[in-house]
Image: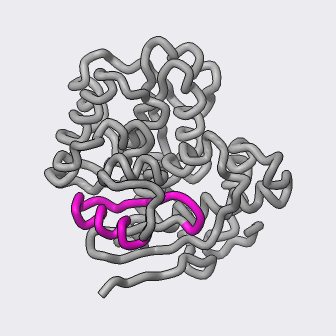
Amino acid sequence: MREERLVTSAMVWLPRRERDSHKGDYGKVLIVAGSEGYTGAPVFAAQGALRSGAGLVYLGVPRGVYPIVATRCSSEMPFPLPDAPEQVVERARGCDVVLAGPGLGRSPWAQRLIFRLVEEVEGPLVLDADGLNALEGQVERLKARTGRTVLTPHDGEFARLAGCGLPLQRRVEQAVQLAGDTGCVVVLKGHETITADPEGRVWRNTTGNPGMAKGGSGDILAGMISSLLGQKQLARQVPCLGELVAWAVYLHGAAGDTAAARCGEYGMLPDDTLAAIGGVMQGHTQGQAGPR
């Protein structure tokens, strides 16, 4: 029997940070993203990870767009991606979480890189956007993974990955099936975003609004998911991967709701969602009061 829960404010309680903690406690995140014409996606993903508490964020982008991306980075640590995928894999092994795909493009090089990360990264791997597109017709590669994996498709990406038609008629059932078939946690984005895990558990989100239907919002979410997965305190508090991912989805939507209240659904930008993340996180931290 499928277990389904609504994710509400009462469910999401973040632990206070230990006084003697350091950046390593909050995760080293590697983001592999970006391409010509898509230089915003890697920055949004990296800032989403940082705003939600990641300790270190390494941002690897293709050499051709590195100068553009680097000028937009402050707390992120950008670097040009080497041509050899094995060098990226080696760097990934030194990180707690890898996020691959935002704005990466669909070149043969990008596909080869995604294949190597899927096959060789043993730690948590979050696949978003072109990280998913690279696996169209290749889901058996996901089945072979032993590390924890999160997929974050919108409907179109889901249809390509699952080999089904649009529109999706049974969103919950289809998300559960893809999670079971691949062994991954699936985040099917949209109204009341669905998070499903391979054991058949489902978390239905209660935050978010139509103002978030703008390029960049999904990149921020992918960064937030990666951030929460790398934070050791959170991992101890929420050992269930699917639930922790659902928390990230909830917090992302809540930040978007704050942005909509301030700027309106028409005028809000992903930057406004980013700016609201800190207050939302504070409002859900044990022993601290802040906006929700």
Give the answer, above or below, for where 149 lies relative to 29.
Answer: below
Q: Where residue 100 appears, x then y in whole percent?
A: 38, 38
Any magenta on residue 177? yes
Say which quadrant the N terminus sits in. Answer: bottom left
Say which quadrant the C terminus sits in. Answer: bottom right
Left or right: 182, with 40 as reference point = left
Q: Where residue 278 appears, x then y in whole percent?
A: 68, 55
Give the answer, above or below, for where 271 lies relative to 75.
Answer: below
Query: Does residue 55 appear anywhere in the picture?
Result: yes
In terms of depth relative to the viewer, which is nearer, 76 or 216?
A: 216
**Quadrant hosting residue 84:** top left
Image label count: 0
Measuring 56% from the left and 74% from the top, which residue is drawn there? 12
Any magenta on residue 92? no
Measuring 42% from the left and 47% from the top, which residue is drawn there? 157
Q: Where residue 176 appears, x then y in whole percent?
A: 33, 69
Q: Where residue 132 appears, x then y in whole percent?
A: 36, 43
Left or right: 111, with 6 as reference point = left
Give the answer, above or below, for where 132 lies relative to 190.
Answer: above
Q: Which residues are magenta?
A: 172-192
What's the coloring here?
A: one colour
Measuring 24% from the left and 42% from the top, which residue is drawn there? 118
Measuring 38% from the left and 52% from the top, which residue is drawn there? 159
In terms of depth relative to the viewer, which is nearer, 262 or 214?
A: 214
Query: Does residue 26 appear anywhere in the picture?
Result: no
